[in-house]
Amino acid sequence: MKKTLKITISIIVVLLIALIGFSFYLKSTSTNYNFEISSDKVDSKVKIIFDDNAVPHIYAETEKDAMFALGYVHASERLWQMDLIRHVGAGQLSELFGKDMIENDKFLRTIGIDKTARISAKEFLINAPENIKTSTQAYLSGINKFIEEDNLPIEYKLLQLKPEYFEIEDIYRTTGYMAYSFALALKTDPFVSYLKQNFNPEYLDDLSIHTIKNNTTIPVTNSDFTDIAKTVASLDEKLPVPQFIGSNAWVIAPKKTKSGKVIFANDAHIAFASPSVWYEAHIITPELEYYGNHLAGFPFPLIGHTLEHSWGLTMFENDDIDLYQEKINDGKYLQDSIWYDLSVRKEKINIKDSESIELEIKETKHGAIINDVLASVKDSEPVAMWWTYNKYSKNEIIEAAYNFSRADDIDGVKKAASMLHAPGLNIMYGDSTGNIAWWASAKLPIRPDYIDSKEIIDGTDSKNDITGWYDFSKNPQAVNPESGYVYSANNAPAKVDEVHYPGYYYHGNTRAKGIIDALESQKNSWTIEDAQNIQLNGNSPTYKSNFDKMFFYLNEDALNEKQLEMLDNIKEWKGTHTTTEIAPTIYYKWMYNSLEMIFIDELGEEKFKTFLSTIIWERSFPMILENENSPWWNNIQTDNIQSASEIITSAFIKSYQDLNAQLGNDISQWKWGEVHQVTFKHPIGKMKPLDKIFNIGPFPVASGKDALNKLGFPLNSTGVYNVTSGPSERITLDFSDIKNSESIIPTGQSGNPFSDYYSNQTEKYLNGEYRKQRMDKDDIEANKSAEAVINVSMN
């Protein structure tokens, strides 16, 4: 007994010593904010003041020196994030994570992000203005200086990796992935083709798929390509970096504000992760000053403001991918009765702890054949992917972003907006002189009038091909409109010269309507506090409208006493989503069961899941609720004909049964916060017990899927709504007090889990609070947390 006790005590002591040692080791990897370094890449001393949120305020004599310092501090906080996103864009995840990522790498290589990145980098080095090249190279030099010091983040130690130096290509790999994450065609178009091939017009009339009637471009093979959508969605779920989802933004003219100056608000919706997407920094030189939000590894802010103007973004959601069904035989593809040689390229994929493999990629004039790297459709008819990102010859996203922050006036920002080709962005603008503007920024392809870009197109006929590009003057845009505001919530823009640009737009009666209703209701007294109230609005008018229609169909006489009690808890619901409410818990379960009963008999289980992974269901559900004679209501697997009332009532009863099994018999405990939660996940956090160190959460959260404070989640049968996306930042500013604009991000500035600034903003973010974006020198000094110096190297 004594011997056993001694052994146990010895083990405990050893574990304690190891734990203490590990704890000291972890502390040693913490970010150093009070550093002093030297470099021959700067021409004069640079001072960096970190404020109370670890935002760096960089004081330099030249733009080049400031950009070097930005690269250095950005890498010191986010090197792993920078490295990860460039590996995604390059299709090199297997180098970091091994065999599990081979399929992702094959797909990403095939669609051509890395190929285009290398071409774009060469063109940039030849054609970009010298000042932009100098600033870009200085930023990369700052990143590489941090890598040289070999004080790498803990992720590298855990995975036994070392990063390579950053090059221009890496910037384009990052923006290429950004462009891909916007592109919904691969997850939508194959499903749309399936619907159009297999359902009569009366079925399609109740679905929002932007169909073109009497389209003649469908190949006669009638192939089922829905597995493309399913497979791409499953690959994307494995990606260790967040995807861009949607966004809100609006800019209010002086005539509608209390201060008599422009008010600007932006909250870009992106998949949640840790660290957060944006890194904030304040640059000050004798010729330049701006406060910007930076993507990992990208030198210039895509969202930000100077003392004179502000710029922000939402996702345009335009359709910039077309899928062409090809005929291929013996290394050739057919078009217009002529057989052309396939273009073939080979790429090597390096794999951690394993031998590399070679990938052969075949291309037609339309783009790469994607079947070979999607196992589920490998034996289907060949499909080529045409993508604006690869097809438009000039990639000027670096130059555009540079000019957003350096432009002198509205014309300079408009010119910068015109330089973007992919991804499509809505650029929002306001300035100190009272101008407001919105530009839908993308190179928009000219398609034949009869082509439905949502459908897989016959590639054997050249008349179906893209014929050119619209001039930027034809892009949707508004400058100083009479309404006194511009806005975007990923909704469809109006036609320009009778041309409708196809896209994957959100329903205009959701967030867009909420913004318009708010801006129209308050005529001329807007403040940034009012703008913040819109950003934090957890009400969803669309779902309230859906509920009212569902309630109309509900047969209360078919309900038992407990089901009537459940109805009492939702009967007066106004579409709000507080954590203590019961109504949202009931509503989402009822909506899911209604959707399942409406669609699954026609679609089957797998295609129903694919349907829920597209935006089509959200836009179509209100349309079906409006039409009680829709053929979708009838269950084709039964002999009886079902009505809307029968389906909705059955779905309600099943929802009671589901929630009773999930949450218990006490309906008062079915609170939204119990089933609607968020965790900000780090890629390393997938490995237990490291999730306890790297992940932040879970937290119960208010709001909902289509509220202005959009907290997205996959709708499924579980009754658990784990939030996966939402506002990646909330920014509000008033040009009457531009030095005290306000923002918040979901976690913190730092990507280091042992930094005090890894999650210090989370509680405020979840509580709907904001903090200053400090630009006043005295205020910065008064709230200084650390100070660093970069000296000129004496070597």
Image: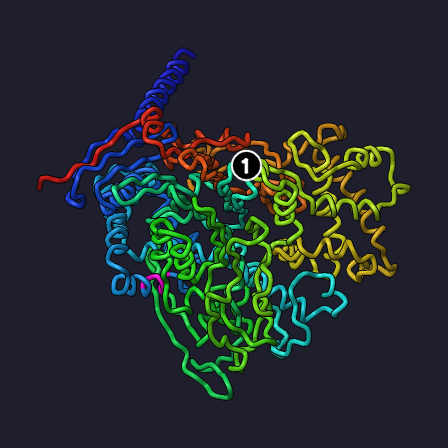
Q: Residue at x 51, y 73 (%)?
A: 446
Please rate how many residues cluster around mark 1, counting C-alpha atoms within 10 Å: few if below 14, some from 14 to 19, many from 20: some
Q: Residue at x 50, y 29 (%)?
A: 764
Residue 217 visible in rendering: yes
Q: Nearer the viewer, residue 686 or 589?
A: 589
Please, which colouring scheme is shown?
A: rainbow
- 227 left or right, relative to 352: right
Is 116 within the magenta?
Answer: yes
Is 508 within the magenta?
Answer: no
Q: Which residues are magenta?
A: 114-118
Residue at the outermost top position: 2
Q: Main secondary structure of the magenta part?
A: helix
Q: Which residue is mark 1?
A: 258
- Give the vertical position of 250 relative to 440 (above or below): above
- 529 left or right, relative to 39: right
Q: Nearer the viewer, residue 248 or 382?
A: 248
Q: Nearer the viewer, residue 535 or 714?
A: 535
